[in-house]
Every structure is written in structure tokens, then in C-alpha cells.
Amino acid sequence: MDLRIGHGYDIHRLDFGRKFILGAVEIPFPKGLVGHSDGDCVCHSLTDALLGALALPNIGQFFPDTDPKIKDSDSKQILKIIYEREILSRSYRVLNVDCTIVAQEPKIAPYIEAMRAILSKILNIDGECVGLKATTNEGLDAIGRSEAIACYSVCLLRKVINESL
């Protein structure tokens, strides 16, 4: 059985005047994540984990921040594109993913189930195969000062020889 593990990381600054999208869920908060896309660091780190599992370049190689066509793009669509074009096309399937969100504020726990539902649908896996948790940085560094949010992600892929397996 061909198994592949991938790891991803992403961090984005928080600033006023942007929608706060995290894990493909819009969360009411006065600040949003700054990025060329919507800044969703959960989707970005998860995309990098998928790419890393196949030893492919990072998200920036596929969706460069210099491309005006993808300005303010929806990160869940980026995740879906990578899943379909790179993972499925190589006959891999996602077995599970696990994400750790690092945010001082807002509280993420009330939105975990909504994130899990959206991400599991995109990756075509059961919700119980999507690990999501949040922690703070105990007031340390930019994350602890509520200036940024980060996410670490891992994934496990399996090569599918025959869809009945």
C-alpha cells in the first residue's frame, strides 16, 4: 500500500477592513486575515500538506501572489482545485487530515464543526477524518498579540489501485 504523509504551515496577519475567513467559514470578527486571496490559513496550510505529501511545490507555485486573476480568491476553491487536479489525478485519496489553528482571538471552538463539514466535503472524507483544534500562543509573539493567526496541517494519502479497495 502506497501511503504518503504531508505537512503544511501558513500564517497571515490580521487587519481591519477584511472578512475573517478561517477553515472556509466566515467568522464575525472586526479583523480579517490579510492575503492575496481571502487569507484562509487553514485552507492554505492544508493545501500545502496535500502538495507536500506528493513532493510537489508549495501553494505559491500553483497560485502566485503576483497573479491578479486570483486576487481575493476563495481559498476553499484553491484547496478543491489542488485536491482534484493533483491528488485525484494521481490516483490518491485522502485518508485523514489534522489541523492545529494558533489564534489568540477570536475563540475558534464554536466554528470547528462548520469547518469540519466543509473541509470533509471538499476532500471527500468523513467528518470524523478531519481533525481540527485551536490553541492560543499564551500572549507570546504576533499571534499572542492578536496580530496574526497560523495553522499547522498534516495529511495522510493512500494510492488507490482499484476504487473497491
Image (tube, grey):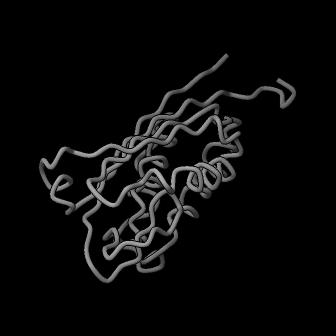
Question: Position of 41 compared to 157: left or right?
Answer: left
The residue that appears at 45% across and 50% down in the rendered structure is: 109
Locate the C terminus by quadrant.
top right
The residue that appears at 34% across and 72% down in the rendered structure is: 32
The vertical placement of 105 against 67, above or below, is above
The residue that appears at 68% across and 28% down in the rendered structure is: 159
Residue 43, x across and y down, in percent? 48, 54
User: Which residue is at the front of the view, 14 or 9?
Assistant: 14
Residue 71, x across and y down, in percent? 42, 77
Residue 103, x across and y down, in percent? 30, 52
User: Which residue is at the front of the view, 65 or 153?
Assistant: 153
Residue 136, x across and y down, in percent? 27, 46
Locate the N terminus by quadrant.
top right
The residue that appears at 84% across and 31% down in the rendered structure is: 163
Determine the image quadrant of residue 153.
top left
User: Which residue is at the front of the view, 10 or 110?
Assistant: 110
